[in-house]
Each structure stands twice: as structure tokens, then as C-alpha cells.
Image: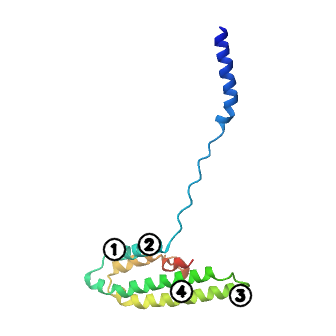
Amino acid sequence: MSPFRRLALVSAAGLALLAGPALAQPVTPPAPPPPAPYTAEDAAAILDARLAALKTVLRLTPDQDKLWPPVEASIRNAVKDAIARREKRLAAPPPATVLDVLGQVADAEEARAKALRAFVDAAKPFVASLTPAQRNRIPTFLGVHDTGQMPATSELWIFEEEE
């Protein structure tokens, strides 16, 4: 072997030994940027989409469409109130005792019950105008599943902005 070739091999081996650990280290990709904060505009867009989707799923007739505005208004009011309750809860000092926590739960349940009652009352004439096939589509869309148990109000998407 020529001295030049030997020098080249020794140099290459030395470089491989020096660079090997550096090359063997896994390259950590940069962390993805944090998600953009969920804004009031996002919440409004999602609510608009859900209401439009519900109307689309139901395939309303022109006569049924005339009965829709009170239903939509009751849903929008429930969501608006849920957002206000969440903001009030987040701005308040943390509860000091377990009774304070339970009081907050009771107040939230009472408020959700009133909003749900308003929705049910507004929806009765509308739902009465629907065909059985249309009525069959409502529970799944609203998130009410036939499990044999009553759903908690906090499980309904109408109130999810409160959580």
C-alpha cells in the first residue's frame, strides 16, 4: 500500500471516529409552535356551523323553516350565557372550601337547567312540525345518546363553552 493511500485511509478513519458520535446523535426537530388560542370568533364560527349543519341534517321545508328562529335564538342564548358563566368563574378567586365548589356546581346546573328549559319550550312547536325521520336525526346531532341514562347538561354541546 502506498504511503499516500495509507495516509488517506488513516485520515478517513480518524474523521469517522471523530464525526461518528456527532452523526449518530438523533436530530431533534424543533418543537411545533403552540396552537393559536381559541377565540370568541372561533366559538362563534363553530356555533354558526353547528346551527347550519343541524338545519341541513333536518332538511327543513319552507313551513318548518319559519319555526326555526326561536329554536336558534334559544341555542344562541344558551351558548352566550355559558360563555359568560365560564368567564365569570375564571375571573373569580378559586373556591375556598368544598361547599364553595358544590355551590358553584349547583349554580351552574341551575343556570343550564333554565337554558335547557328555554330551548325545549322554544323547540316544541318546531319539533312538532318535523317528520318522524327528521325527529330521529336530532338526538345524535345534539349529543344525546340512547344509553338508558339521562345525559348531564355539561355533556351537551350547547353548554360546552362553559367548561
Judge from the rendering whether residue 87 lies leftward or rightward of residue 22; answer left or right.
Answer: left
Q: Residue at x 49, y 87 (%)?
A: 116
Distance Cα–Cα, label 1 vs label 4: 26 Å
Q: Nearer the viewer, residue 75 or 139?
A: 75
Q: Residue 111: image x %, image y %?
A: 55, 89
Return the residue at label 1: 56
Q: Residue at x 59, y 47 (%)?
A: 29
Q: What's the amino acid at mark 3?
A: Leu
Mark 1 against mark 2, which lies toward the viewer? 2
Q: Residue furthest left?
A: 62
Return the residue at label 3: 99
Distance Cα–Cα, label 3 vs label 1: 44 Å
Disc 1 to disc 2: CB gap under 8 Å = no
Distance Cα–Cα, label 1 vs label 2: 15 Å
Q: Residue 35: image x %, image y %?
A: 54, 62
Return the residue at label 2: 46
Distance Cα–Cα, label 3 vs label 2: 35 Å
Secondary structure under tag 3 reads helix
Q: What's the amino acid at mark 2?
A: Ile
Q: Residue at x 70, y 27 (%)?
A: 17
Judge from the rendering whether residue 34 lies leftward or rightward of residue 98; answer left or right.
Answer: left
Q: What's the amino acid at mark 4?
A: Arg
Q: What's the amino acid at mark 1?
A: Thr
Which label sits on residue 112?
4
Task: Give the quarter of the image for residue 133.
Answer: bottom left
